[in-house]
Image: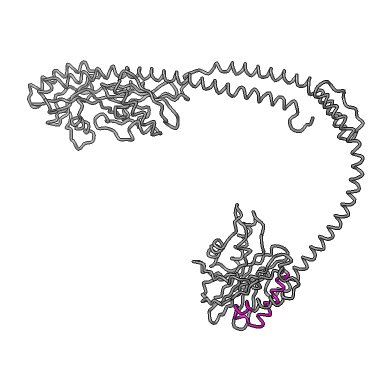
Amino acid sequence: MTSKGLGLRGRSLLALGMTCLLALIPTGLLGWQILENIREHFGVAFARNLTLLNREKILAPISRELALSQRLAESELTRQWLLDEDNPGKRALFFKEAESYRRDFRDHAYFAASRHSRYFYYNDPSKPYSEAPRYFLDPAVTANRWFYDTLRQKDAYNVNIDSDPKLGVTKVWMNVLVSNGQERIGVAGAGLDLSHFLRDFIRSSEAGVVPLIVNDQGAIQAHPDATMIAYNSGASGAKDDEKIFRLIQDPPGRNALISAMQAAQRDPQHEQSVWVKMAGKRQLLVMAYIPELKWHVITILDLRAAALIGLNWLLPIVGLLFILFAGLVLGFTYAVERLVLKPLRHLQRSAGAIAGGHYEVSLPAGHQDEIGELSHAFSVMADKVRTHTSELETRVNERTHALQEANSKMQLAHKKIADSIDYASLIQRAILSNNELVGASDAHHAVLWRPRDVVGGDFYVHRSDAKGWLFGVVDCAGHGVPGALMTMLAHAALDQAIDSYGISDPAAILAGTDQIIRTMSSSAPDKQALATSTDMGLAYVDPLQQTVTFAGAKISLYFSDGQDVQEIAGARRAVGDKRVGSYANTQIAMRPSLTFYMTSDGFLDQAQGELGYSFGNARFANLLQAHAPQPLHEQIRAFNAVLADCQTRHPQRDDITVLCFRYT
């Protein structure tokens, strides 16, 4: 037994808890699904009953007003007066009959509008009785559009919502056409104040329940949010953003709503229901149709928000389950402690003594079970450990002494090798000391020199005479100590070739260096195994002629003005290669805006990125273009930063040398 992590008791309780949890999860999910189905069933029934109740509340008063309005509009006295509007006798008969209707209208108000004169007549309790027109229906006034839209419609009447948000008044106008045969001579009807009814209708006391009314085109007639109501849509129609369809967020839901509305219009006696996505939630939408008004009474129900089923009964059940679970855990804990943990603690103390080196300790008597078998196995193990420990201690002492001696010799050898490499680095730097040092720079040139190891196989060249300067980058085969030794050979051959041909003919210097290296290596005992190939690029700058003469052996010359980058490739064979190469000079006009670059393949082959691909020529060219206009020391700093970023993931593969120069 150990104090770290879970003991056997903890693991047993954890296993019991996980078992109970695995049993409770599917049971809980199943119970929750049943509860959701019950909630949905009661939610649908509640929404249907509420919708039918609201339909009857609306249908009764409005149907009566519409029927009276139709009788007034179809009256022969109304028709005769509108055909001869200036006749005093016909006018008096009409208003006498209209006054009799006025007593029956709920709001004791009626109106008539003439197509011929475009006068609007209106009487209600708030104004003195008058047979004179109240105002002229000017077609240029937007508020009068209902009259002309009604005259143009196909139906014999329309029910139009008109609301004044400032006064808090909402009226439903029954606009009934007055016709003389096929000729439409006017509109008559009444207005019903639904302000109190609609306020009661849209203010549901239930959370998650939204009642609303839309017409057969989907235009919203009543809604808890007054800004969403399509006023005057009964006569003039409604815009798309005033219709219920814009509230549905999923296209399948819009199509389902349209189908449900059409089904309700075909069968007004039965309500229709559809599930849609509104306000980011799945909600139930139940509708009932009123043919007389061409209205759909709709109830939107959010089952998650609506308190349809009380959950108070869940608390006692959860409490009972918790008590049962606690009793089960306590009983299980006692059984584990009595039957398993107590015998194991005796065995643990004996095993701990053996682990501390006390092999003479006596183990508890074994029971006739797995713990007894374990005690017997420990007794056998203790005897064997006692015997083997004595033998191993002797062998370990002997081996330890031998390893210490070997380690001392290895450390001494390692120190000698490290000292030799450091000394070789000093020698290499001393031989290449004529302005060929890392970080060397002046107003005309700068260099980045980074050996992979303490010593390396790269160096760069900077020579001058009375007329110009010679720059070069040399990459010898190998790196580390072998590469450093090759730099000595290449440096000596290059010096000899420059002494012979001068510094103004790079191609001749390359050819001469190649011949000298071959002569030096020809006397080697196994010259086939000696790798003498050396990449080399040389550029001679003539300030008076304003030219740069370049020749390369597998090293290119790049130059850029910051707008683009151009490359002059070196010859395909290196200096000292197995086959003799051919080298030629290329001359470039030198402009003050150009910066010239030569690099060994160490920069181009540096791994970068997550996949470790080589840096490559294309990225190198982009790097030159981005920094070409900057001062040379700033460019070297940028190259160092790029290498540092690459080497955060991947180590340096090869020696790296980058030389840049510019003459103004």
Q: Residue at left 66%, top 78%?
A: 515
Point out the image quarter for the N terminus.
top right
68 is higher (above) or lower (below) than 637: above
Q: Residue at left 67%, top 57%?
A: 651
Q: Quadrant of residue 275?
A: top left
In the rendered image, residue 492 lying in the magenta stretch gets the answer yes
23 is higher (above) or lower (below) than 549: above
Point out the image quarter for the C terminus.
bottom right
Q: Identify the colour scheme used.
A: one colour
Residue 380 visible in the displayed image:
yes
In the rendered image, residue 128 lying in the magenta stretch gets the answer no
Residue stretch rendered in magenta on the structure: 485-511
* Residue 516 pos. (x, y %): 68, 78
* Residue 499 pos. (x, y %): 67, 82
* Residue 163 pos. (x, y %): 29, 28
Please tell me which residue lies in front, 409 or 87: 409
Please tell me which residue lies in front, 525 or 469: 525
Q: Quadrant of residue 479?
A: bottom right
* Residue 567 pos. (x, y %): 53, 69
493 is higher (above) or lower (below) than 299: below
Residue 122 visible in the displayed image:
no
Q: Is residue 85 left or right of residue 639?
A: left
Q: Is residue 435 left or right of residue 297?
A: right
Number of marks drawn: 0
Q: Quadrant of residue 448?
A: bottom right
226 is higher (above) or lower (below) than 58: below
Give the overall secondary structure of the magenta segment: helix
